[in-house]
Amino acid sequence: MAQTKLHIDQNFIDTIARIDSGELMLKEAAALLGISPPGLHKKIAKYKRQLPPESLMAITSPAKRVFLEAKAFGLGNKQSARLAYPDAQEGSLSVLAAKVMAEEQSQVAMRDLMARNQIDRNHRVSILAKVINSPDLNLAIKGLSESWKLDGSYSPTEINVTTETDIRALVALLPG
């Protein structure tokens, strides 16, 4: 009878490596580990989902990796920066967070971390659509605002408004 519980140990990790290299078939590996092939397949999939994405491991700075993992866990920029850079001054945490998030490599790693938890862009857009279609108008307005940020609809230029400015002239400055 096959095992119902398979512990992740070095033998399991070595067996996965042998399967990945083509040295061992899933059915043979399952027999070696005393588990059914579908059970082993599920266990391997679960194990691989728990591994950090390659894009995160490509980041050489351990502090940046800690920051990105904390951010993907749901912490805010300052909280994540506080974990990653414990010696940094309180006032510089938001600057450090912005610098890390501005890097292309960090953005790729963050997308991969979010996708690993099934919160990729498509999922976020579908949730945003539900928010926009909410009967609560305050929530719908907030959703619309977020959607405009998402697609870049907000004006990139800053318009200075003074008391003497003609409103028609301001409207003429707006794009599109």
Image (spheres, grey):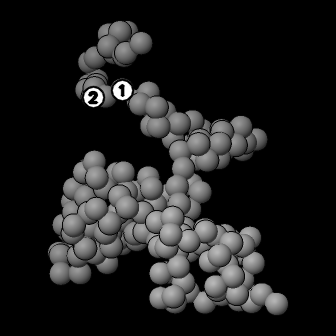
Residues at circles 2 and 1 in contact by the CB criterion of under 8 Å: yes
Q: Is residue 51 left or right of residue 56?
A: right
| Pick the front one: 81 or 141 | 81
Which residue corresponds to the image point at 23% horizontal and 81% vertical from the top-left?
86
Q: Which residue is mark 2?
A: 158
Q: Is residue 97 left or right of residue 29?
A: left
Residue 71, placed above or below residue 28: above
Q: Which residue is mark 1?
A: 155
Which residue corresponds to the image point at 34% horizontal and 51% vertical from the top-left?
107
Q: Quadrant of residue 95?
A: bottom left
Q: Position of residue 75 (x, y in %)?
A: 44, 69
Residue 98, placed above or below residue 21: above
Q: CA distance from mark 2 to mark 1?
A: 7 Å
Considering the image in quadrants, where does the C terminus appear?
top left
Please tell me whether mark 2 sits on a helix, a strand or a loop.
loop
Q: Position of residue 109 (x, y in %)?
A: 37, 57
Q: Position of residue 1 (x, y in %)?
A: 82, 90
| Numbered badge on residue 109 | none
